[in-house]
């Protein structure tokens, strides 16, 4: 197989990513990390393969490829049949045996972690999942360009949503039409999320009372879904006048993702719903100005909550029957990366973080309203990577 990051145009990108990971390794006092999860292999390798990437603190990484028939004839690629051979190869190549080795406790199965531990007898082990997530939290210029490309494609799909709608449709039928447009636009058809307790399809179309139906996931407006095996999102309800339709569909076109939500109405909706939607827009425009490097992340949440309260919208803010304690999250290779934008996160914003902000409201009997954009943190405030009209328009 070909490891694309070793092409000349991506060699410098690898150096930047390695430098960020190694900075976290130094902070966490790790001699090396052994990466085996799909997402982190993609981050460090530029492609996905079965195997491991061994990243020592000071020497070049080694790629351990399984099965051997897929390994390149390159000095950084090593063909192995099983992970038990990794330590032996390190010794043969003169790599120092790690005293403290980072493994992805949060990203691999328990049995996989225990197996890898047995491959390095005598070593001390630490969780490297957080180290890598922190490194991925601040994006390189290359990653930001990828996300801008995603946002462009996502906006192109959203522009076609009114043409997907027909009177008398169900929410499922509308979602299917949007999914068709997504795939034709180039969507990869996968939505990667961190953690093992959240499963999603290509996105969410929620209308009317279904927006107030709690799901087992940490969503302000989860939706019932169509089957207990996937209890989230559209539930087959017919889209009817007087309700809103919140559309939060996949933005993954190139290995990275953007997250964008827009709302439409079916005929006239209540004045309360329109005011709540406008409140969401005002919240985002305020956050776009104050979200500067160094500002505590908690301030974004408190500002949003205060605006909602000042406009008497707090009862519906971030859910009605089921409320959540955040208004945003990091976005990148996975949909829900660090940081979480919530009241108790006092970490400072950093330039080139990419975050999705979603101050939404659930209005009983009408549905969900509000918008979500993905942003890059800059010295001048937030740069919108998902620019698209924000008005609550009639489908």
Image (spheres, rainbow, N blue to C red):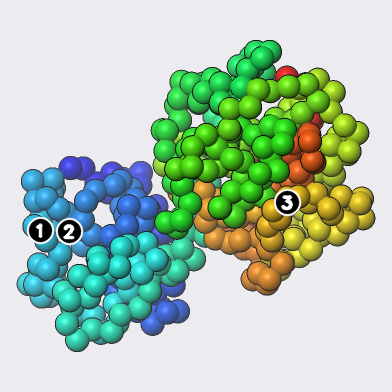
State which quadrant residue 92 falls in.
bottom left
Foreground: 349 or 203?
Answer: 203
Q: Position of residue 156 (x, y in %)?
A: 59, 25
Q: Position of residue 121 (x, y in %)?
A: 17, 82
Identify the residue position indicated by label 1 in the image: 80
SS at mark 1 in the image: loop
Instruction: Choose mark 2 or mark 3, whichever is in front.
Output: 3
Identify the residue position indicated by label 3 in the image: 321
Q: Are marks 2 and 1 in contact (CB under 8 Å)?
A: yes
| Residue lying at 29% horizontally and 47% vertically, measured from the top left | 48
Residue 378 seen? no
Q: Position of residue 257 (x, y in %)?
A: 50, 42
Identify the residue position indicated by label 2 in the image: 64
SS at mark 3 in the image: loop
Residue 188 seen? yes
| Residue lying at 69% horizontally and 53% vertically, measured from the top left | 322
Instruction: Choose mark 3 or mark 1, whichever is in front.
Output: 3
Disc number at residue 57?
none
Report crowding for label 3: few under 14, some 14 to 19, many 20 or more residues within 10 A (C-alpha): some
| Residue lying at 18% horizontally and 42% vertically, measured from the top left | 1
- Mark 3 vs mark 1: which is more N-terminal? 1
* Horizontal side of residue 35 vs 66, given as left or right: right
* Horizontal side of residue 319 vs 7, given as left or right: right
Foreground: 53 or 204?
Answer: 204
| Residue lying at 84% horizontally and 42% vertically, measured from the top left | 276
Foreground: 171 or 294?
Answer: 171
* Horizontal side of residue 297 vs 339, given as left or right: right
SS at mark 2 in the image: strand
- Mark 2 vs mark 3: which is more N-terminal? 2
- Mark 2 vs mark 1: which is more N-terminal? 2
């Amino acid at each position: 197989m070909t490891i694309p990051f070793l092409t000349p145009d991506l060699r410098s990108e690898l150096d930047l990513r390695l430098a960020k990971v190694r900075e976290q390794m130094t902070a966490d006092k790790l001699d090396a990390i052994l990466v085996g999860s799909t997402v982190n292999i993609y981050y460090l390798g530029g492609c996905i393969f079965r195997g491991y990437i061994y990243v020592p603190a000071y020497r070049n990484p080694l790629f351990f490829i399984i099965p051997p028939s897929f390994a390149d004839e390159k000095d950084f690629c090593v063909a192995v049949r099983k992970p038990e051979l990794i330590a032996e190869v390190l010794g043969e190549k003169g790599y120092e045996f790690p005293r403290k080795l980072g493994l992805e406790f949060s990203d691999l199965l328990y049995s996989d972690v225990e197996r890898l531990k047995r491959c390095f007898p005598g070593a001390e082990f630490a969780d490297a999942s957080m180290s890598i997530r922190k490194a991925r939290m601040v994006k390189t210029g290359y990653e930001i360009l990828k996300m801008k490309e995603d946002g462009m494609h996502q906006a192109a799909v959203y522009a076609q949503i009114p043409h997907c709608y027909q009177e008398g449709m169900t929410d499922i039928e509308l979602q299917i039409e949007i999914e068709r447009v997504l795939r034709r636009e180039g969507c990869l058809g996968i939505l990667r999320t961190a953690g093992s307790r959240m499963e999603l399809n290509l996105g969410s179309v929620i209308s009317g009372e279904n927006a107030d139906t709690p799901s087992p996931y940490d969503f302000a407006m989860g939706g019932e879904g169509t089957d207990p095996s996937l209890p989230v999102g559209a539930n087959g309800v017919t889209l009817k006048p007087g309700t809103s339709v919140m559309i939060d569909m996949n933005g993954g076109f190139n290995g990275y993702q953007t997250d964008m939500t827009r709302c439409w109405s079916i005929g006239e909706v209540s004045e309360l719903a329109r005011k709540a939607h406008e409140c969401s827009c005002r919240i985002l425009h305020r956050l776009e100005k104050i979200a500067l490097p160094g500002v505590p992340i908690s301030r974004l949440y408190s500002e949003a909550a205060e605006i909602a309260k000042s406009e008497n919208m707090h009862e519906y803010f971030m859910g009605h029957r089921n409320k959540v304690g955040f208004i945003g999250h990091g976005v990148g290779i996975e949909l829900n990366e660090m940081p979480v934008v919530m009241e108790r996160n006092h970490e400072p914003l950093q330039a080139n973080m990419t975050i999705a902000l979603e101050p939404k409201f659930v209005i009983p009997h009408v549905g969900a309203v509000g918008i979500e954009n993905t942003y890059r943190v800059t010295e001048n405030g937030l740069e919108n990577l998902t620019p698209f009209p924000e008005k609550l328009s009639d489908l």
